[in-house]
Image: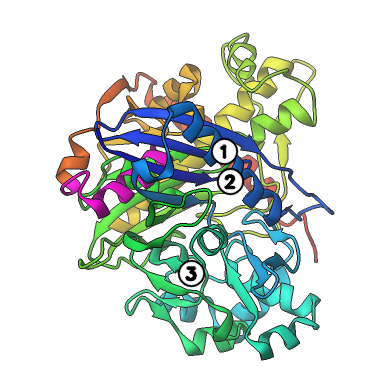
Amino acid sequence: MRYVGAIDQGTTSTRFVIVDEHGTFVSLAQREHEQVLPRPGWVEHRADEIWNNTRLVITEALERAGLSASSLDGIGITNQRETTVLWDTATGRPVANAVVWQDTRTAEIAKNLTDTYGADWFRQRTGLPPATYFAGPKIRWLLDQHPDLGALIERGDLAFGTMDSWLSWNLTGLHVTDVTNASRTMLMDLETLEWDEELCEAVGVPMSILPAIVPSVGVIGPCSDPLAGTELSAILGDQHAALVGQAAFGAGDTKATYGTGAFLVTNTGPTIVRSTAGLLTTVAYQIEGSPAMYALEGSVAVAGSAVQWLRDSLGLISSAAEIESVAATVDDNGDVYFVPAFSGLFAPYWRDDARGVMAGLTRFSNRGHIARAVLEATVFQTHDLVAAMEKDTGDRLSELRVDGGMVANTLLMTFMADVLDMDVVVPSKIETTVIGAAFGAGLAHGVWVDTDDVASHWREAIRYQPSMTAGDRSRLLHGWSKAVDRSFGWIDD
């Protein structure tokens, strides 16, 4: 039996899984890390804590499986994208807390970039508009706030990375990132797959601190403790890994992942499709020795985290799973709509000035209506992304493959099929992000021969089919549209 490992470094936790040649989970260990919230709109992580947790979950998973690191053909990393770390390579310590992808502190930097260069200038080169979401402005903010870092830059001791780079550096000593993560910085040219000097100068990022860009799948280098004896052989941003895990290798194949946020990704093959509908153009993945594959992506900042908010901040539910039973106590949303613009709105709106809104409340509204509105917000946001995707591609989606923790919610998935008016398909393995990273590592070492071999391990588990009337669908979407309009313009500065 052959085995591979995968690190899944997510927004709320880090885990390590061991997968055998049949694509079966052999062992898993997971640990949460602290969400540091210094002020409204700011979200930080402690990179040291994440690295320590990574070491612990690797050790735990290997012990549970009764395997050593040398038993693994290779390992892959999948990670929360855009979260930005700067560290001192001489000491190995971060110079500040990591700025998380959800963070909005770079709104002024993004606005200045748009005013100076125009959003289309960045979109043409990077596939991305200037926004708080991406890593480049976060680097600029950290450098502005810590002018003493200039001395580290002069000595060549300052390094930037998203979480994949931070973990890769600690595991292998190599300062690298892959094409998928690099494509989320606003600093890489989509066509050349290289750092662009003019982009770096515009954002104000010295090229000397950037990692080397490597293919997503291919041997990168030998690992040290706690994975000494195996090799790092794949890196994929989380949504790109989910695309691989869903075996969405053909142009037009589409998946949606529901975790902290929600992410709709359509594979466009080797063709770069530039969005006119508010979506992002991004690298889907690249296998060493082959051309890069590209994708269109719609990103939603708040999905599962809205359920956590309902539990932790409002106390309306005692567990995330409870939201389904509470929402099921009412027949419909009672005309209550929730727009979870905690960090503004991402695709297709790109409004940093938006904030969360609960609309349509009356004395009739109760706990069930609010729970249902929170769940339905994820569906309505998905509808907006699907509409934008169909506009950009000119094709009508026939079905949507879904994954992530929220797909276990039957009420949510049923409503998803109804509002999207299409089949919603749940695979047998819903943890597609981490399995995608494992597949990448295995492809690099011949555990799986090619993408067709990987696709043979994908199985359908549940298919939800629409039954809602067109009139009800139209009424609900009209209410959602009104609620979104009311979330705009809350932040003046």
> Which residue in the protein does label 2 denote?
54
Q: Which residue lies at the image location 40% right of the left edge and 25% below the top edge? A: 418
Horizontal and vertical percent position of residue 432: 38, 37
Q: Is residue 469 visible?
A: yes
Q: Which mark is residue 174?
A: 3
Q: Which mark is residue 57?
A: 1
Does 131 appear above or below 268? Answer: below
Q: Is residue 105 left or right of residue 67?
A: right
Circle 2 residues within 10 Å: few <14, some 14–19, many ≥20: many
Q: Please, what secondary structure does the residue beneath circle 2 have?
A: helix
Q: Which residues are magenta?
A: 432-451
Question: Marks 3 and 1, how far apart in space?
Answer: 21 Å
Horizontal and vertical percent position of residue 260: 58, 40
Instruction: Name the quarter where the N terminus is drawn.
Output: top left
Q: Is residue 92 left or right of residue 300?
A: right
Q: Is residue 11 visible?
A: no
Q: Please, what secondary structure does the residue beneath circle 1 have?
A: helix
